[in-house]
Image (cartoon, rainbow, N blue to C red):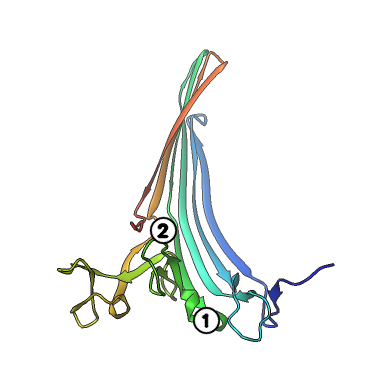
Amino acid sequence: KYTSTYNANPDLKWEENKELNFGIDFGVLKNKVSGSFEYYRRKTVDLLVDVPAWLSTQVYEKVWINGGDFTSSGFEANIQYYALSYKDFDWKTQFSFSTFHQKIDRLSSKWTANSGLNKKGWLQGRGLVGDQNWSQYIQEGWELGTFYMPEYAGISSDGKYLFYTATGGVTRDITKAKRKVVGHALPKFEIGWSNNFNIYKDFDLSFSFRAVYGGDVLNV
């Protein structure tokens, strides 16, 4: 026997994806140096997402909707170099570089009908109560993972946190604080470097490094 766990949505449509890729593979010096470069752009239309039900007539806790459209794009580079190649010793090194950008192009009416869906990154912990402890906001034209928070203005004489208001003053009431974009969770780029050594055909040694630059992290 099968039962439904989601509310019906008669307006639900298939999610569509459109992608464009440009790339080049190369090898020089008898493939001692090889690699690839690639640029891609991906458009997602009518993204499928399950959200909490918001109508009193809905029986189940969740409902599938078409949340909206977003665009992803990026560049990837990979270069491989056979640095040394002898009878009993080989060394191969590889470098990678990538960027990733994502933007919200459109939010559907089903999404905007429930304003609470825009608030993400809820903070949990001792003393964090109420409906203002969210850190990220979803809005058309913004990146996913945009930190949208009150701006810290210091500590009051009695030890309370202060925040700036829209008029330029300060307040200890977070509900009256002005929020602003303070960072983005997505990194600007990632790089990697790996090395592999083969010794006497029977022993392998490898190590790698990876670095992420530009992504903001919320310190709670």
Please, is residue 93 above or below residue 129 in the view?
above
- Determine if residue 196 is in view: no
Q: Residue at x 64, y 70 (%)?
A: 15
Residue 28: % across, % down: 48, 34
> Where, by quadrant of the figure, is residue 214 drawn?
bottom left
Q: Residues within 10 Å of mark 1 (few under 14, many from 20)?
A: some
The residue that disc 2 covers is: 186
The residue that disc 1 covers is: 114
Q: Residue at x 61, y 66 (%)?
A: 17
Q: Amino acid at mark 2?
A: Leu
Mark 1 and mark 2 in contact (Cβ < 8 Å)?
no
Q: Residue furthest left?
A: 157
Q: Residues within 10 Å of mark 2 (few under 14, many from 20)?
A: many
Residue 192: % across, % down: 42, 41
Q: Residue furthest right?
A: 1
Q: Check the picture and name the quadrant holding the N terminus.
A: bottom right
Q: CA distance from mark 2 to mark 1?
A: 25 Å
Mark 2 / mark 1, whichever is N-terminal? 1
**Of marks 2 and 1, the one in the foreground:** 1
Q: Name the element at disc 2.
A: loop
